Amino acid sequence: MHVVGAGSVEGAHLLLFLLDHGFTDITAHDFVAEADFGRAFNRVHVGWPKDERAAMLERVRTSVDLRYRDRYLGGIEGAAAIAVTQGWYLYDHNSKLAESAEMQSRFFSLVQLYLALAPGTVVGVSGSLGKSTTTHLLGEMLVAAGRDVIFAGNDRHGQQALGRLEAATPDSVLLLEISNRHLKVIDRSPNVAVVTNVYPNHLDEHDGWDGYVDAKTRMVRYQGPGDIAVLNADLDVTRGMVSSATSDVYWFGEATGDRGERGVRLEQDRLVDIGMSGFQLSTADVPLSGRHNLYNVAAAATAALAMGVAPRHIHEAVRRFRGLKHRLQFVWDAGGVRFYDDLNSTTPTSTEAALRTLGDRVVWIFGGDDKGLNASGLGAVARQAVKVALALPGPGTDRILAWLDEEGTPIELVPDLPTAVERAVALAEPGDKVLLSPASPGFFSLYYVGTDEDVGFKKLVRVATLGEPTSPPARKPRRSAGQG
């Protein structure tokens, strides 16, 4: 048995699961140098308490044949089975795997094990935007209704849950957040599939838009009668998925009910079900900001209602839900300036939603790698919402800067995150908002500071607002070309 990506969240969990179940002849691979493995491991496992994380690291190091950069993928040709983590194909050092269809026939993944081993209902949530918030909301609704929920997320804060399936029963609900990379390898759909939306993203990984849509459609393609699909009623692409579904289909969005469907309709001031359980929820009772979050609530509520959750439990869960880290998270207030951490917005579309929510007078920090996505909508919204955009260097930054220049948005170039935060504090006035929202991938690995992302932006903001210097002076500001 070989495991690729030993230090990753998925790879380490697979290793520990295999060790717990009596596997002894395990070879694990990680491309970092041996001296760097511990630091890299701790960085991606921030969701675990420090002592547990240390015990996990020690067990991985001592219980398997761990092959680092100098022996990476050595002997993998002879493996009886090969466990891979999502996105393994993105790395040049895995070219040996990418070029061998024979070795790929021996692959298995964490999400495949979840789908195969769960004794009860499997609920999966996917989408280009909003899947994390929707997954957590749905989990809270199910828990409020007294369901036994086993949750597995898709970020470094999460703890995977294969081991918990041993104590699961047919009444247990396994709730998964499923990424496009997971979907590339599955041939089984969850019993309850929620697709929040589909917008251009990761197109280079799927040979374009059609391949990306095909991957998302796998959420419903392998369902059968009695399964449940929950789809966005307001997008043609999700409307089109119904042709692949043999399950019971429910809808959410502003257009729900227009064609006689069941689901939850999003109106101006309330969410109301169509043909279900008499559910209504005032938007004033939703503690999350932004119209996009009302869609997340509608998606989760539709799935919960379809699974038999009473409206009162949905109300209870929504009213106590306070959002997730790094998703338009309010983190600080100083001198009448509010600071928001939206680190997980890695596309122009998601940052556009954040800017729309904040409205105007926004000092915006962004930048990163390039996904090749169109940022024209972001540029138009930024023109109205942004007081000044603070751009960190990167190929994705360059693409967005072109759209901002065209719209006449004021821009300053900054070399690093400490400088950006210091500059934002200097520029912001009472009533302004400072928003960290990358609009590009790779922000964390390129710019983040501190031991993990829990201390980076918030710590810099606190230090800067308390008057302690954190970085060299910013570069001189550059006015946008549209400003003359």
Image (cartoon, helix red, strand yellow):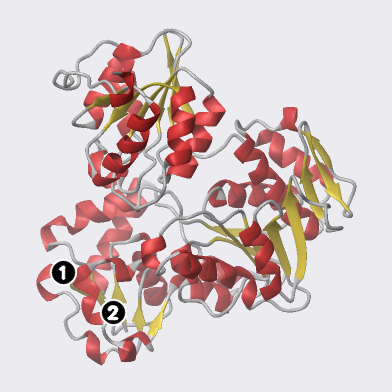
Classify residue 332 by image quadrant.
top left
Q: Are marks 2 and 1 in contact (CB under 8 Å)?
A: no
Q: Considering depth in this image, is 335 or 207 the residue closer to the camera?
A: 207
- State left or right for residue 155 relative to residue 300: left
The image position of residue 172, as x and y in percent, is 68, 66
The residue positioned 22% from the left and 81% from the top of the image is: 96
Which label was assigned to residue 68?
1
In the structure shown, which secondary structural element does the residue marked by tag 1 occupy?
Answer: loop
Q: Considering depth in this image, is 10 or 268 the residue closer to the camera?
A: 268
- State left or right for residue 301 relative to residue 385: right
Name the amino acid, label 2: Ala
- State left or right for residue 434 relative to residue 283: left
For the residue carrying disc 1, how many other residues have a C-alpha within 10 Å: few (<14), some (14-19), or many (20+)?
A: many
Name the amino acid, label 1: Tyr
The residue positioned 48% from the left and 42% from the top of the image is: 350
Classify residue 386 by image quadrant.
top left
Give the residue pinned by disc 2. 98
Q: Identify whether 395 is placed above or below 386.
A: below
The mark total stands at 2
Classify residue 71 by image quadrant.
bottom left
Q: Identify whether 3 is placed above or below 60.
A: below
| Residue 286 in sight | yes
Q: Identify whether 244 is placed above or below 445.
A: below
- State left or right for residue 354 relative to residue 301: left
The image position of residue 228, as x and y in percent, is 73, 67
For the residue carrying disc 2, how many other residues have a C-alpha within 10 Å: few (<14), some (14-19), or many (20+)?
A: some
**Where is the N terminus found, in terms of image quarters?**
bottom left
The image position of residue 341, as x and y in percent, is 42, 32
Question: From the viewer's perspective, is the residue at label 2 or at label 1 nearer?
Answer: 2
Mark positioned earlier in the residue sequence (2 or 1) = 1
Q: Calculate the distance from the C-alpha at mark 2 to the C-alpha at mark 1.
A: 19 Å
